[in-house]
Image (tube, rainbow, N blue to C red):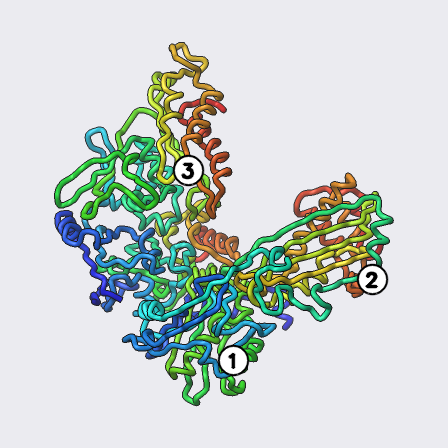
Amino acid sequence: MKDVLYFAPTELTEALKLLAQYGEKATILAGGTDLVPRINYYELKPEVLVYIGNLGLDYIEQSDGKLIIGAATPTAKIAASPLVAEKAAALAEAARLSASPAIRTAGTIGGNLANASPAADLATPLIALGATVVLVSAKGEREVAVEEFFKGPGETVLQPGELIKEVRVPIKKGKSVFLKLGRRKAMTLSVVNVAVYVEMEKGQRCVDARVALGAMAPVPLRCKKAEGVLQGCVLPMSALEGAEFLDKARIEKAAELAIAESSPIDDQRATAWYRRKAGKVLVARALAAAAGVAI
Amino acid sequence: MKYVLSFNLNGLPVDTLVKATDTLLDVLREKLNVVSPKRGCDNGDCGACTVLVNGEPVRACLTIGLTVAGKNVQTVEGLQQDGKLHPLQRAFHEHYAAQCGFCTPGMLIAAKALLDKNPKPTREQIVEGISGNLCRCGTYVEVVEAIQAVAAGKYKE
Amino acid sequence: MAEYVGQPVLRYDGIGHVTARTRYVDDIQLPGMLYIKVLTSPVHKGIIRHLDTSAAERMPGVAGVITAKDVPGKNAYGLIPDQPVFTPEHIRYKGERIAAVAAVDEDTAMEALEKIKLDIEEQEPVFDPFKAMEPGAPLVRPEGNVWEFNSGKTRKIRFGDVEKGFAEADVIVEGTYTTATNDHAPMEPQVSVAYIDETDRLAIYTVSQDLYFHLGMLTAIFNLPMNKIRYIGGTVGGGFGSKNDIHCDHVAGLMALKIRKPVKYRLTRREETAYTTKRGPWTFYFKDGVKKDGRIIARYVKTVHDTGGYAGMGPYVVDKNSILVAGPYAIPNVWVDGICVFTNKPPASSMRGFGIINGTAADQLQTARVAEAIGKDPWEVHFINAWREGDLGATQFKVEAAGLIEAMKRAAELAGIELPAHLKAMSSRGR
């Protein structure tokens, strides 16, 4: 077996230099929870491992109206953070429901995104919350919306030499909800997961709605058609003017549209048929909870 | 290409030569003959290799060995103090919380990680705490009872 | 003795388990031990046309390579010894062993496997047991795809006269039920450590659930008398029937005999799940003749068991299933045909219950369907038909110490179900 090189830089600039030097040969290692099984089973034969756990990218901060989460922040820390719970409830819930304790202490938010599983639990809440990722390389920095970060299963816009530095989540007034259906309660990938964000003017008129579906397409999916039918709708008892009522029927319409935008597959976890059925129910429940509508 | 890996294992310093792709499980079991973490799946699924790194539970099979450089690693070999069984060890034994015993070391570490942070967990929190540890013999009920007994203070010195 | 009766007794191995002093086979490391990896068939069915291991043998770090040519005794094992340790020619399932490499570590052994030149003429496989029984189906086995029992192509249970029973019945109830393949998934994967000991005996640390059964097979494979094999077992990290079959000891033993060095052969979880013996899938067809009062007076059952590429314990599993599949009921007319079929899948063998629980699942579904057909509560049908003391089973054994009615009453109680008084009044002691 060819010798594998290992680097554990302690400065970001040093890491970026290594990534520039080794280019496509470099494999970025953080918590390892997705990467190491592939090494153990010889599916991936890395040439150069660059460990980014010592770069100080483990932080959760509030700055400039945004929640800033370092790429190497473990899922457990996100699940336990009162700040995340308050400012990005769907993300906190997704972190809490992902995997199991010993996976959450190692697995990181950056790794969850970079692994680009269509079922990545943290991707859907970040899309629903309108988050961005900051990508850095020796050449500079760019910011990409999470919904535009994924290209396909295991594929992202990350270029060789590039690294996720942090995730930025805008802090907004509305309410976010995350729901997950797995084969069992813990230690399971999503059969389908849903994250929604709804902002209600005076608690009565929907001024912003975002819907994201996981494990329902080759990438975590934002469902814009579903969002469109919620915009401007008002609660049935509202004194405010609105195009349509935001009621059970409207929410079910949105759920239907979300599923129509998706393209789930049959796999060992569930059939596409089941994913559509269950996904529709989850979208409706999440929207109802976020908008304060009884269904 | 081998690297020198130095870390603290159950309170004592160790140095060993490892490959970049050796997992912490490889390092502990194959290099250091510390065999309490079990190799059940090499995939992060079973939990039998759970160990503590700087007090946090991790899967040894998912942890690249070199990443624990300078850190504290705890395994079941380090649970006993002054020759006395840890309360969790006594409780597991007396509650029949081990049948074939293969998942037991991982279960003990998961339980310790839980109680270190939350000494008085609810039953639900205990179930959550061991949710990443599989037991094919099905001793979950006894494991939960053993942890409850420790949390209730029944195994104080 | 009296001090233990009625008292909880702590496990003798409990302290070992909680201190992790219990030594499982993979915990054993011998000085100079080498690691084995096995080349398995990438196709479901085929013929090996060419096998060249020389490049692997020459690779630095490799201590030895073995194939079918290196089996000094009988290259066959199993309860029905039909499965080769290494297949010399015919491949009957994906994952069948072809060659093994021993090297300084598993990474090197894996690399050596890639250097083995293997030319397989791939053939059309068959996976569905019903397709495998059709005329002209690809032959999994040269002798045919249906196992020959001493009673012919079916295991036959004949009791009373089912045709007469159907004629006398008020209602005929039919049903087809299937159960899927299961893997045992013990926490401890399959593993073996073998070495030549100080008295020149072949010593093997094993995870076997069945030491003497396996020792017998190993003597035949190694062509060694029993007193030349030290077979050391006792600590098993869960088996659930999987360790009733040999998965590693034969390969490790053959390698140790050839290279005279300590070796370890362990399966990864993925290898174990994909390639080892399974609880095979079943299909059950039931036809019952039923009286309106709930009595089942005739039951015809045809079962098809998929045993994969080799017999494993499949025929034995069919025997046990056939004896009990008609259920714990006093049915005067029973006809069972049990069929065991070869397909190009990993061999089916023992797993908790040897086919009995699959039959029970089918029987319970069918009996519930019987109740539905005559508009009765399933409890009623179970109680009316349950074996009483002295009843005859379908194989003409006399039921002794019957307790089904009492067990059902207790189950209802635990489930919080209030049974009607006439059922509560019933007893296994009489009808």
Q: Is residue B26 left or right of residue C75?
A: left
Amino acid bearing label 1: Ile
The residue pinned by badge 2 equals C390
Of the pair C366 and A271, the residue shown nearer to us:
A271
Where is residue A136 drawn, in percent x and y?
17, 42
Dot 3: what SS? loop
Q: Is residue B102 above or below residue C223?
A: above
Above/below status of A181 relative to A254: below
What residue is pinned by disc 1?
Answer: C221
For the residues beneath circles 3 and 1, the answer to whether they share a chain is no
Q: Earlier in the sequence, mark 2 or mark 1?
A: 1
Q: Chain of mark 2?
A: C
The residue sitting at the bottom extreme is C199
Chain of the residue under the numbered disc 1 shown in the image: C
Could you classify mark 3 by the number of other residues whose Cα lies within 10 Å: few (under 14), some (14-19), or many (20 or more)? many
- Looking at the rendered structure, the secondary structure element under dot 2 is loop
- Res C142 quadrant in image: bottom right
- The amino acid at mark 3 is Met
Question: Depth check: C425 or C303 in front?
Answer: C303
Q: Nearer the viewer, mark 2 or mark 1?
A: 1
Q: Secondary structure at mark 1?
A: helix
Q: Residue drawn at (42%, 36%), measured in percent from left and top? A: A263
Q: Report the Cα–Cα distance between label 3 and label 1.
A: 52 Å
- Residue on which the image places disc 3: A216
Q: Chain of mark 3?
A: A
How crowded pointer 2 is (Cα within 10 Å; few <14, some 14-19, many 20+) is rated as some
As drawn, is C366 to the left or to the right of C426? Answer: left
Report x, y in % for residue B94: 50, 61
